[in-house]
Image (spheres, rainbow, N blue to C red):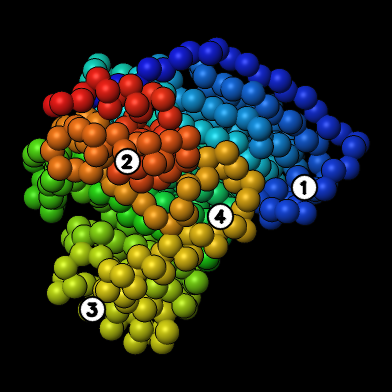
Amino acid sequence: MLRKLVLFIGLLSVVSFISDTKISYAANDPSFACLDAAGPTQVVTGFYGTGKFEPETAPFKKFDARTASFEIPYDISWGKVVLRGSSDSHDMCWAGGYVTAALDWHDLDISWDQSKHGYDQSGTYRNTAAVESFHNRTTWTGLHIYNVHDGIRTTDSNDNWRIQHVWLDYIRDDCVENDHIHSGEIYDVLFDGCYVGFSSRPSSTGYSGINTIIKMNKMLMRMEPMPYPYKWDTKSDPTFTVPGYGVTPFGYGNTFKLDNGNEPNFEITNSIFLHEYDSEKDIFPPIAKVTVCANNTLIWLGDPTKAPFSLLDQINAKFPGCLILITGKVQGKTLWKDKVADWHQRHPDVGVNRKPAVPGEYTWPRYQGSVIGDADGDGKVDGKDYLIWLSHYNQPTTNGVKDGDFDINGNVNGLDYIIWLSNYGS
C-alpha cells in the first residue's frame, strides 16, 4: 500500500465579514449567484486541517468559501463542515470550497469499512461526511468534494434543501445522504465517482417519505467500482477483479438506496447515469414513486445482455421519452466525456485549480496496483515507463499511473519520478 507523505501545515484561516459592500459573484460562474442575495456574508479563507468547522448561523446568511479548503482528520466523526446553530436559522447558502479526507488514514485504496470506521478498526464511530446541514432551505453550491466517505449530508430539520453546481469526486459511500427523507432538489451537478448515488434510507424509525419530493435535474452521475465494497466477503453481491490488482474485489452499491415501502417521490429530468457493470443493485427508484420523468440517459458499459431492458420498457410506458439506454462503449464514453467537458466549461470556478486535464476522461482504480511505477501496465518498471512520465511531466492529469502520475495526486512531477526511480528494475 502506497502511503503518501502528508504534511501537516496546521490551521491557517482568515474569517471576515461583509455586510454593506455589494460584489457581483455570478458574472462568470452561476455557482456563486446566491452570494448576491440579501443577508449577512461570512468570508471563509485558508486551510482547515483539524477538528470541525462549525460557524455561527443566522437567517439568510451566506458563506463565501471559494478560497477555503478543508481536510477531514482521523479523529472526528460525522461532518467536517457543519451548519448547525440557532433554531431560527434558515435560507442559508454555502458557496465554494474544497473538502477532502487526510490521506494518512483515508488513502485511495482502503476498503468501504475502513473508510467508514478508520483503518485501525478501533471502534470509534467516524462515519464522516464532507458537509452536513441542520437547517431548513439550506443551499450547497460551488463545492469540490474529493475522496471522502459521504459527500453532502442533509440532517434534521433541513427540509427543502438544495444542492447545485457541485463537483463530487470519488465518494466512498453516499454522494448525497438524505436518510431523514427530507424534500430537496439536486440541480446541475457532476457526481463523478459515487459508491452510492443517492440515499434516503433511515437507520431508525420516525422518518416518512410520504409527501416528500426529490427533484433531480441536469445531474451527471457516474457509479465507480471501488476496492473492497460493503461486506464484500459475506454478501453475494457481484464483484470483480482488475488485472494488476491481485484478488482485490471491486464494486459499488445502489444508485438509489431507499427505504422499501417508505420511499420519497422523485422528479428526474435531463440527467445521465453511467454504470460500469451489472451490480444487481437498485439503479432507479420504484416506478410507482416516480412522478415526473423526461429526457434521461442510462449509459451501460457492462455486458449489454445484462442491461436493464425491463426497466426501460416499464418506465417509458409510464413516461414516454423518460429514459434512453446506451450500451455501446464508444458512444457511451463519448457522450459522458462531452457532457462532463461542458459541465466544467460552464463552471470554471468550481475546483478551479484541480480541473482534469481532459474533462470526461477517467480511469479507475485510482491508485497504483501491485507493480509501483509501471505506467504501461506490462508488469515491469523500465525505461518505457520513464518516457511516459517524461512526456507528461509538469502537467495535470486524471489518468493516474497511465500518465506517470504514480502518487495519483493529479499532477505529474518530480515526486512521481522518485517513485519510478525507486522501483526501477522491479
Quarter occupied by residue 373: top left
According to the picture, the residue beneath numbered tag 2 turns out to be: 388
Give the mark nearer the N terminus: 2 vs 4. Answer: 4
* Figure quadrant of the N terminus: top left
In this picture, is 346 found above or below 101?
below
In this picture, is 336 found above or below 133?
below
According to the picture, the residue beneath numbered tag 1 turns out to be: 25
**Circle 2: element type:** helix
Residue 174 in view here? no
Give the mark nearer the N terminus: 4 vs 1. Answer: 1
In this picture, is 328 found above or below 358?
below
**Circle 1: element type:** loop
How packed mark 1 is, by other alpha carbons closer than 10 Å (few <14, some 14-19, many 20 or more), is: some
Give the mark nearer the N terminus: 3 vs 2. Answer: 3
Kindly identify the residue that appears in the image at 46 percent across and 32 percent down. Answer: 100
Give the mark nearer the N terminus: 4 vs 3. Answer: 3
Q: Kindly identify which numbered label has been placed on residue 344.
A: 4
The three-letter amino acid code for the residue at tag 2 is Ile
The three-letter amino acid code for the residue at tag 3 is Phe
Kindly identify the residue that appears in the image at 59 percent across and 22 percent down. Answer: 47
**Circle 3: element type:** helix
According to the picture, the residue beneath numbered tag 3 turns out to be: 309
